[in-house]
Amino acid sequence: MSDEFQPKKSLFQNLKEIIYGMAAHDMSRYAIRTRASMEHLFILITMGDLLGVPILPPYYSLRLLPYVVPQIATWKRRMLREKDLSDAMF
Amino acid sequence: MSLKETFLKNPDRRYVMFGGKGGLGKTTFSAATAFWLASEGKKVLVFSVDPQASLSDIFQRDIFGKGAVQIKENLWAQEIDADSHIKEYQGEIRQKILDMYGFDKVPDEIEQYIQAASAEPAMEESAIFDAVVDIVVKGAYDYYIYDLVPLGHALYYLSMAKVYDEWINRITKLREEMREYEEMVSRLKQEKHTEEDQILTELTYIKNRINASSRILTDREKTAFFFVVVPEEMIILDTQKAAKLFAAFDVPIAGYVVNRMVPRELLEQDIPPYLKNRIEMQAKYLNQIKRDLDTQVQAYVPELERDVTGLPMIEKLAGIMYGG
């Protein structure tokens, strides 16, 4: 098994991860979430037609399409799902 | 100043456009101008951005969608086939998706979007717009003569450049903000590098393409835009309106060409009252044109005895416009 060959983490490495977990993990999680929201906003303003919201002249939006292919499914789910109060809390 | 002098005095004006209401002679003047410049030894491309182009008709050769076709020495003509341009482009996008993700086929949802986007009316204009950039950026000719679409479309074409530019600036900003968040995460996680944002690269590319095209259309040094008018009330009014709008988009108006003048000498002959009335009507509006536009009128072109098609008639017209 490949695990056996992995060198043990040093004390310093362990300490570093603990400190990251305590201090910065939440921040980076928040940053990733914000980044994801912006990603969806970006797809909305470029590919709005997918939901029937035509926003931009389509010729150049096609150029961007290949890059957002993997996000489109989650984006659609997020844009079209019902919103309720609990959204504000989580 | 005559048209000839205008061209000789401004050798840097390599992009020449004739604009005006439909059916006034834009294509005819484009062809004649191209013919004259070519006979002066300049390498000229006259091309049409009109989906219903008529360069094929005037040169009496089928050039639609065939790239630049040589008509005579130094003279090439091209009609952009927007449909096949769009199809080719769609193909490239599909291929890119397949290559990037290793799919066997494009997912249905994405395919539907590609189809739907291409059915939009704006698609054709944008495709032509983009094709023009391709042609002009290469810079292989001394002169580029745009056979423009009628006024409304030409304005749309111009305003599109501004709208696009604005739009792209905004989403580029959003994209850059997204990038900042990404960098913040990798700093927090102490990762060394973040991947290059390919979308940002694409956006910059798109922005440069659009700017290249609109810069040419509004470049005072390099562009000459001529309005074609006919001495009739409605046409003069429409042209004045259009001139204002074009000025608002910073299009440098190089002058006016008056077309379809019924020769006044006919009055000396025994002609029917119908023709007499038309000559008098034209005289009235011609006075108005002279009063309002004065020195900006660069050529007066008479109504010819037959329509201008085929090289001999084009040559004759070129002689009238640029002779003397």
Image: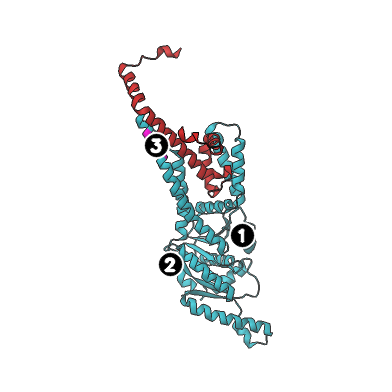
Chain colours: A red, B cyan
Q: In the rendered structure, does residue B182 fall within the stretch colored magenta?
A: yes
Percent across and percent down for residue B100 are 52, 34
For image coordinates 53% across by 72% down, the residue present is B257
For image coordinates 61% across by 59% down, the residue present is B53
Q: Main secondary structure of the magenta part?
A: helix
Residue B278 lies in what quarter of the image? Answer: bottom right
Q: Which residue is mark 1?
A: B53
Amino acid at circle 2:
Asn
Q: Residue furthest left?
A: A12
3 and 1 marks on the same chain? yes
Q: Pick the residue in front: B148 or B55.
A: B148
Residue B307 lies in what quarter of the image? Answer: bottom right
The disc at residue B181 is 3
Span highlighted in magenta in the image: B178-184
- Dot 3 falls on a residue whose secondary structure is helix
Q: In the rendered structure, does residue A72 fall within the stretch colored magenta?
A: no
Which callout, 3 or 1, points at the residue further toward the start of the chain? 1
Amino acid at circle 1:
Ala
Q: For this view, does B217 lie left or right of residue A17? A: right
Q: Which residue is mark 2?
A: B10
Percent across and percent down for residue A84 are 52, 36
Which callout, 2 or 3, points at the residue further toward the start of the chain? 2
Which callout, 1 or 2, points at the residue further toward the start of the chain? 2
Q: CA distance from mark 3 to mark 1?
A: 49 Å
Q: Residue furthest right?
A: B272
Q: CA distance from mark 2 to mark 3?
A: 51 Å
Q: Pick the residue in front: A62 or B45.
A: A62
Q: CA distance from mark 1 to mark 2?
A: 28 Å
